[in-house]
Image (cartoon, rainbow, N blue to C red):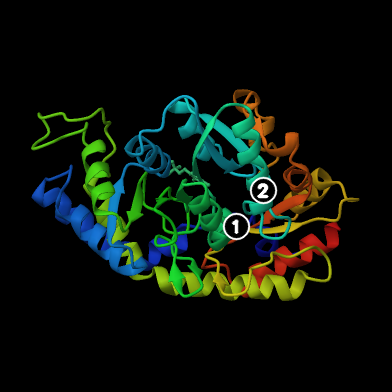
Amino acid sequence: MSSAAREPIPFVDLGTQKLRIRAEVDAAIARVLDHGQFIMGPEVAELEAQLAAHCGAQHAVACSSGTDALAMVLMAKNVRPGQAIFCPAFTFVATAEVVAWLGAQVWFVDVDADTFNIDPASLETAIADARAAGHEPVGVIPVDLFGIPADYDAVSKIAAREKMWVLGDAAQAYGARYHNRRVGTLALATATSFFPAKPLGAYGDGGAIFTDDSELADTLRSILFHGKGANQYDNVRVGMTGRIDTMQAAVLIEKLKIFDDEIEARNRIAARYTALLKDHVTTPVVPEGVQSVWAQYTVKLPASVDRDAIQAKLRDDGVPSAVYYAKPLHRQEAYSHYGIAGGSLPVTDRLAETVLSLPMHPYLDEDTQDRVVAALISAL
Ligand SMILES: *Cc1c(COP(=O)(O)O)cnc(C)c1O
């Protein structure tokens, strides 16, 4: 084998994108250095306007991270102890972490075996279980896992009946589509992350909240600046430091210009992976009317294979892989005391043992895709 063929493949390659936009990013950063408004500079409002226009939400509130975006919505909704918030257990820890911050009760819900997203039937079970435990159901946080929007129609129907709010955790799915609407318009509020490796990533931490509710947007702008009222030295509520840096906003404005093109590339690559892998593993299922942004391309391995051994063989071939998530949240020490829908989450537990995420980014060329595919088939 030639040395080029054995060169390690990056799991997420941010370098090729950087080459593409380097001159524009350098100029954007230089403009921030020149004007010197490092906090709440003009780029922040400009980014917010562009994001709102891009996804179709009335308001985009840029902030410090995806985690803070989630937390600030919970703060705005006055979440408190005794209240129950529902979220899938098969997600990144931040989804449940923010509920714990506010002392409310997390209730873990199982996920759909095909989409890996919150299972509406399990949500119904969790709501009944929470009530029986004396907790007041107030909100649900569906997660758009790996870039595929959750089943918002089903979740919203249940939430409306229960008079609960819906907060979308779209940290992995900004840009995705759901029946001709974009993520950011599918819930009362939607939180996203601009962590560098997310589909729309900054060069540091960042996030945003989308909503059509003007009062909520105003409250969030207050919370992210220490609960400011008329000015930052007038504190009308308890807030935090939740602002995005002007520098990151400037970077994101440049990245947003090429983002739709990158989403197309991700979809092209995912379709090719699926065509080449569908006879060997269970390839991702994208529901009718939905477009993913492929934060991850995640397959399910046959239950009989040793995933660690597969990953080791891939590594030998220079092909990185990752397991999101080997230890679901209801099995994490810090979260094991919270409620579980129906007492067990069988789909979550099965997925945790069988999923495998492959290299995915918009600049993955066909030769590299072929190397990943060949390595996986040979490892199997
Ligand atoms: C990345 C992620 C977050 C947190 O975003 P940060 O910007 O890293 O704080 C929250 N939820 C999910 C599902 C994520 O993948």
Q: Mark 1 vs mark 2: which is more N-terminal?
A: 1
Tag 1: Cα neighbours inside 10 Å, few (<14), some, or many (≥20)?
Answer: many
Secondary structure at badge 1 equals loop
Instruction: Tell me whether circle 1 and circle 2 mark residues in contact (CB < 8 Å).
Output: yes
Q: Quadrant of residue 273?
A: bottom right
Q: Which residue is mark 1?
A: 296
Nearest the camera: 380 or 163?
163
Identified at 24% across, 54% down, the residue is: 214
Q: Badge 2: few (under 14), some or many (20 or more) residues near its Cα, within 10 Å? A: some
Above or below, comparing residue 114 to residue 322 in the picture: below
Quadrant containing the C terminus is bottom right
Amino acid carrying mark 2 in the image? Ala
The one nearer the camera, 318 or 224, is 224
Relative to 110, 303 lies left or right: right
Residue 233 image offset from top left, x and y in percent: 10, 29
Tag on residue 322?
Answer: 2
- Does residue 123 appear to the left or right of 103 in the view shown? right
The reply to whether residue 366 is in sight is yes
Q: In which quarter of the view is residue 342 placed? A: top right
Question: At which x and y percent is residue 85?
Answer: 52, 37
Q: Nearer the viewer, mark 1 or mark 2?
A: 1
* Image spot of residue 302 (x, y percent): 86, 56
Q: Residue type at mark 1: give it.
A: Gln
Q: CA distance from mark 1 to mark 2?
A: 9 Å
**SS at mark 2 in the image:** loop
Q: Residue at x 78, y 60 (%)?
A: 376
> Among all residues in the image, which is located at the extreme right?
304
